[in-house]
Image: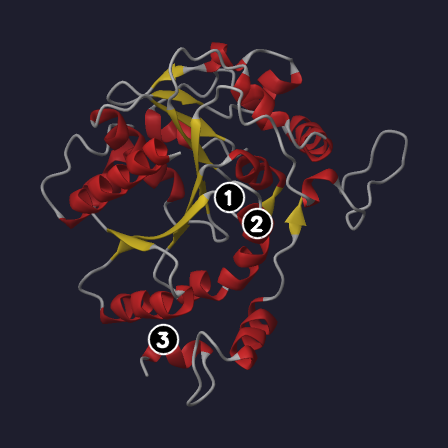
Amino acid sequence: MSRTDDLFAPSGKSLTREPKARNARLHFFGTLPFDDGTRANQKDGSRFCANAPAAYEQPHHYDLSTPRPTVVALVSVNGGVGRSTLATALSSGLQRLGESVVALDLDPQNALRQHFGVAPELLGVGRASLLNTRWETLLQAGFAGCRVIPFGHTDIKQKDNLQRWLTREPEWLAQHLSTLGLSERPLMLIDTPAGNNVYLHQALSVADSVLVVVQPNAACLGTLDQLDAVLAPYLERERPPHCHYVINQLEENSAFSRDMVNAFKLRLGDNPLDVVHRDPSISEALAFATDPLDNLAASAACDDLKRLCRLLIARKKAR
């Protein structure tokens, strides 16, 4: 048994099949609360109930015949796993392989625009939705010919208003994607906030593929049970999304990281798992808002990204 098995499995027990091990992880890491932004008081002094049933708790169906992009949602329970960085690199890589790519930021932190060098003052989906502005006016130039739709700057009140609205309108994102007015059917990569929140559920409701982004550490491994619960309703629908796990920023020379990869394989069983190795040039690109693939030499990370891009293209063609 490896050192990582010792973190979660009782002595002599299987990490993946022992119920006590799962319960111990849930007890240690706790539950994953849903943040719908409805805890703030309204002007009339009333209060939304955080425990009340809400529309987003059951995936809402929409017309699959409506032309829309092929959607890849990048999701994570844990913050700081490099989700936005991976979304940027995949957008450039897919575009270079001949796909028409749109990167959509659904994270109120508005971080994706920094990766693409989009000006912070430009209108994004946050305020545009509140102003009833059509999303096609928000498209910005990205890397290698791809396009970007930023979340844009929003103040606290705007964030609260938007989150409450999205909680009541589970088809908000589906409706916007169906009216984007794109002449071709692009691949859309959606960067979602970490955790269990209304933006994540909006993205999952339209996703054709889900990339679960983690890092090779105990924190990410320990939250997979909660993530399973979040994904379960979407994986049970008539046309469920493909779900693929990606261990990001792997340090190949770290024995602990390699042990963690094995622990993830044990935990995930038959679920598809890929790795993307750490490469300094990818991280450095953010500092200069440059294309992370421009200076990426032949390397393990380069091969990893190409493999992921080809996988996403194959899944798009198969749908």
The reply to whether residue 145 is visible in this rendering is yes
Give the amino acid at mark 3: Thr
Q: Position of residue 122 (x, y in %)?
A: 47, 15
Q: Nearer the viewer, mark 3 or mark 2?
A: 2
Front tag of 3 and 1: 1
Q: Disc 3, disc 2: CB below 8 Å? A: no
* Residue at (29% x, 71% y) in the render: 259
Using the image, tell me which numbered label, if any, was put on residue 236. Answer: 2
Name the kind of residue labelled 1 in the image: Pro
Q: Residues within 10 Å of mark 1 (few under 14, many from 20)?
A: some
Residue at left offset 37%, top offset 70%: 266
Image quarter of residue 153: top right
Q: Nearer the viewer, residue 42 or 132?
A: 132
Q: Quadrant of the N terminus?
A: bottom left
Q: Residues within 10 Å of mark 3 (few under 14, many from 20)?
A: many
At a point 25% along the width and 34% down the height, the residue shown is: 285
Marking on residue 157: none
The quarter holding residue 310 reads top left
Residue annotated with mark 3: 4
Residue hosting label 1: 240
Figure quadrant of the C terminus: top left
Residue 159 versus residue 278 in the image, above or below = above
Image-quadrant location for residue 161: top right
Q: Quick one: SS at disc 2?
A: loop
> Residue 45 location in percent, x, y?
90, 35
Residue nearest the observer in this picture, 210 or 263: 210
Q: Position of residue 118 (x, y in %)?
A: 38, 21
Q: What residue do we see at 50% from left, 80% from top?
A: 18
Q: CA distance from mark 3 to mark 1?
A: 32 Å
Q: Are marks 1 and 2 in contact (CB under 8 Å)?
A: yes
Is 2 left, or right, of 219 in this rendering?
Answer: left
Q: Amino acid at mark 2?
A: Glu
